Image (spheres, rainbow, N blue to C red):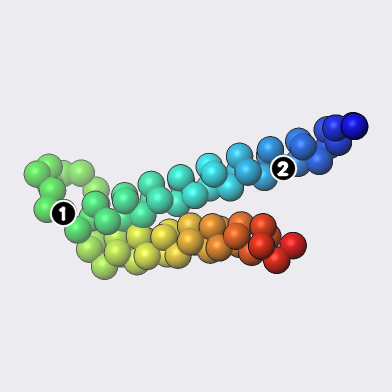
Amino acid sequence: MTVHWGSLLAVFLVSLGSAVAVVALVATALWGLSARVVAADAAAPRLSRGVGSAVAAASLTAAALVVVFGFWVIIVR
């Protein structure tokens, strides 16, 4: 029995990259949703409510697409 180290490294890097991407996208979505909360410090630059909601929706959609693509790779291939 042999271990294909190149393939193992490729799987590790892709899974690490996709996990980091999903976490970053969800964090961006939470940042976008935070624009909907009334700020106590009005001096800080903020997103408008609409732009924050759009950023959150786009980020969550992208994160969902990454997860669905992963499922597709596992099930179909």
Q: Residue furthest right?
A: 1
| Residue at 23%, 55% in the rendered image | 35
> Which percent across, then down, holds residue 64?
48, 61
Q: Which residue matches tag 2? A: 11
| Residue at 61%, 39% in the rendered image | 16
Which of pointers 2 and 1 lies earlier in the amino acid sequence? 2
Q: Which residue matches tag 1? A: 37
Q: Is residue 53 above or below residue 22?
A: below
Instruction: Locate the C terminus by quadrant.
Output: bottom right
> Which percent across, then down, holds residue 61?
45, 65
Q: Quadrant of residue 5?
A: top right
* Secondary structure of residue under mark 2: helix
| Residue at 22%, 63% in the rendered image | 49
Q: Is residue 40 above or below residue 74?
A: above
Q: How far apart are the two marked residues, 2 and 1, measured between alpha carbons?
A: 40 Å
**Residue 2 seen in this snapshot:** yes
Instruction: Locate the N terminus by quadrant.
Output: top right
- Amino acid residing under circle 1: Val
**Residue 47 seen in this snapshot:** no
> Which percent across, then down, holds residue 6?
83, 37
| Residue at 12%, 53% in the rendered image | 38
